[in-house]
Image (spheres, rainbow, N blue to C red):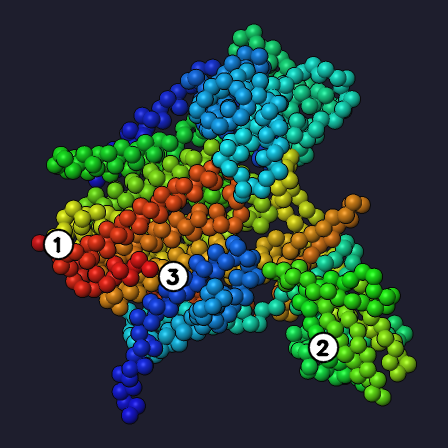
Amino acid sequence: MWANFRRWKWVCLLSSLQLTVLGLLIMALLVIGGTILQADKGIYAAQREVFQSWVFWLFGLIPMPGMLLVGALLFVNLLAALLLRLRFSWSGLGLVLVHVGMLVLLGGGFISSNQSREYFMTLGEGESSRMASAAREWELAVWIESGGNRQVQAVDIADLRPGRPWSVPGFGLELTVERFLANCRSLAGAAPGETVLEVAPANADPAENVPGAVLNLRGPQGRTERFSLQAGDEAPVVQRWSGRDVHFSLRLQRIILPLRLTLLDFTRTVHPGTDLPRSFTSRVEIEGDGLRREALIAMNRPLRFRGYTFYQSSYGEDAQGGASSTFAVVRNAGRWLPYVSSAMIFFGLLWHFAAQLISAKKKSLPEAKP
Amino acid sequence: MTRKAIKPWLPALLLILPLLLPAQDSGQVQFKSVLILENGRIKPLDTFARNLLKQFSGRSTFSGQEASVWLARVLFTPGQTLHDRVFLINHSDVPTALGIAGQGRQRYSFLQVEPGLAKLRQLAMQVAQLDERSRSAVDNETWRLYVNCQIYIRLLSACDFAPAVEPGSREPAGDEAAVLAIVPPSEAGTEGWLSPAAFVAGPGREAAAAEVLLLQEAAQAFRSGQDREFSRALGAFNRSVQGRLANGAAGGQVSLEIFYNGLDPFFKAQLAYGLALLLLLLSLLVRGRLLPRLSLMLLLVGLLFHSSGLLARMVIMGRPPVTNLYETFVFVAWVCVVLGVALELAQRRALGVMTGGIAGLLFLLVAGRYSMEGDTMGMLAAVLDSNLWLATHVATISIGYAGCVIAGIIGHVQIVHRLLHPGPSPFRALAARSLYAVLAFGLVFTFIGTVMGGIWADQSWGRFWGWDPKENGALLIILWCAIVLHARLAGMIRELGMAAGAVVSLLTVVLAWFGVNLLGVGMHSYGFTSGIVRWLLAYIAVEIAFLAAALYLARSRPVPRGASRGAGAERT
């Protein structure tokens, strides 16, 4: 039964070149569509709707395969072709290498789009921190303070769906999100200590949104409270539970880095007589792993440390001449995969076309004589 | 062999010869070598004058004289230039709106424009309020004229050595000081430079006072027509300034740039490519091997100029060949011609000369239009400042573009040939083989270049791929080439389908190259963006006509079934 599985119809279809051409065509159309969408609605919407989606809704009505689905299709097609059709010979080695490289590239792209996390860290000159925060992912943080120490619990706001309670570990509280507002403003005229939120139209890029939530809390003796929380820099909501002040805040997700970074100095140079920037350079001190050293972070010169990479992202200058520097902090488990796959594809193509050239020469030699 | 190899050098030498002869008026030579700081780059005044005159009038000479002669007159005898017709107005609505005499696209003198200056300022302020993308052609032209008039007015007084106000009583405004920044105020010359008038008016700076006196003497000599004195004073000025600049422009690079400007290598290359194509056309009428050989030779002559121009730019800037959009045109044109020559040497069937000549000529013409915008040798923003990645990523992807372009042109040739000669043809079979090879070449280099771009992005922004329009454009080229090559492998398309596919691959290159720039960030150009959209649409219309022709061929002639299906599929 398995002997001639190569001839099964669906196996043939899966490994067929026709499927490759179709998949590539759809991918090309998605690239065009996504680019036009991007010019219209911004990069974030284009990524969410086309480039990082399984299904893409054309005009909001017609379901079309999204980039992930087409990628998966091509991945399977490629794998099937590799196992069933490609010749493993010296002259075919180049093409095999190219297609294995493509598999790694597609897989790596998938891993990156799921695993890669980007955070930001802004430091003034002389400041130091071991914390970075996300650009658009929010978390609900609950903490108590005692003697300068904070006991904090935080949860990703995306996991707090209305109706699903979160029992805050160590606090004896149960928290339910009654309503989540992707973007909101707080209404003026509310009583002191009370926030009333109003829904605002969501922005195309969630980084510009100010989310809010209406929360229900249940405590030890069946006591319940209901209050609103708006994200941002405003003071956290404080409530007294079991004789302790409990703080609630909706804030950008934070991570603790395996190092402490201190900005020693930020310099920006311009081409003389113009505003055209020539370089941005941050001199920093790294403290971690029991060592302390100075390092430079500049354009095209990131700093790498224990799986995190720090890039010079932007800067600020105040009227007093003080400068601040913002770093993008990226953690991407699949970071090295594109390098491996590109090298494979590069050498594969080189091998393939060199082999073709040699065989073409061999063929054309007898023809040349008459 | 040796005789054949030497030949192309001879006409080239003849064209360069006038430049090697000793210059006649040495005062002008010294004037050209005066250093100026503009847009962050220290360059010879010759370059400044040419770019300025081109920006004003669309030409790099004025009434048969070099741009530097005109600039010297503006600076030292300003009153005599008020009648010079140097202000080109490209749109007839502009003079009407300003209420000045004259109509249509023509050149105006400052005195002709002057009555409308107040109105011009008012209109320009309105344009400045508009978003750059929503400006009309008239808006852009108004703004261009306003900017040019402002520059001209400032130039008129840039060498005013007797300021109306007390010296040191005021700090010149930034723009005013920067219009003719030829005096480095500080010892090392690292901060912004000043115009002579701004220097004289500014608070007491001692470092360059003697130099400004020399300029004053030069101006005096120019007015009284004493060329020897003019030359002496400017020579002393140049030596003094160059002596003060610790690591500024080296003398060798400055004279190379002046030589490059005078040689105008890309124009000469265009000429040679155009002639080569003309001879090729003639060879259709006149039999024999002389004309095809001559046209290849002309292509090589053009390539020689083209290469020397590229090389000169690399030495002057200390950069790899491609750092901005202008240079992509020059470089892709160069690679196309190299590919054409390689094809010709391999096959000797005129296909290489034709494709290389067409691509070289067209892209150099486009580059010429871009050079109207000002200095094509600009300084780089911080993120681009990496010779390693410029040399690898940018150069590689440009080579990939060139491969797809040549493949696309061969596709056109095949379709036209088949329309004229429907029967089987060994020439088309040869062309099909070349097309396959060049398209594969294009795919390989575009792919490698794109991946290198990803690695660069990973190094500088922390992401390999971000679905940026430019990245998508490159991806589109790769996908399309892969589609064509796989469809051929699957037997879905044959000769005609490949030809149509190559035509589309040329279209994707053009879209990725400039279409993408129009989508997002508006191109930094005056009156060119709207023009380019028109050209782009016209080009797309032509390509649709070609694809329709391919479809017609596939349907109407008894050709193998595969080709028919293929041409249909390419239209999607």
Return the residue at label 2.
Answer: A177
Q: Residue furthest bottom?
A: A1
Q: Residue at x 72, y 68 (%)?
A: A212
Q: Chain of mark 2?
A: A
Q: How far is disc 1 from disc 3 in space, using C-alphas?
A: 31 Å
Q: Decide: few, some or many residues near mark 2? Use Cα within 10 Å; few <14, some 14-19, many ≥20.
A: many
**Left or right of B310, for residue B572:** left
Q: Residue at x 46, y 40 (%)?
A: B530
**Left or right of B167, for residue B232:** left
- In this view, B480 is above or below B287: below
Q: Chain of mark 3?
A: B
Q: How far is disc 2 from disc 1 in space, using C-alphas?
A: 75 Å
Circle nearer the N terminus (1, 3): 1
Q: Quadrant of the C terminus of chain A?
A: bottom left
Q: Position of residue B441 (x, y in %)?
A: 33, 56
Q: Quadrant of the N terminus of chain A?
A: bottom left
Element at label 1: loop
Q: Amino acid at mark 2?
A: Val
Q: Which mark is residue B424?
A: 1
Q: Residue at x 55, y 62 (%)?
A: A45
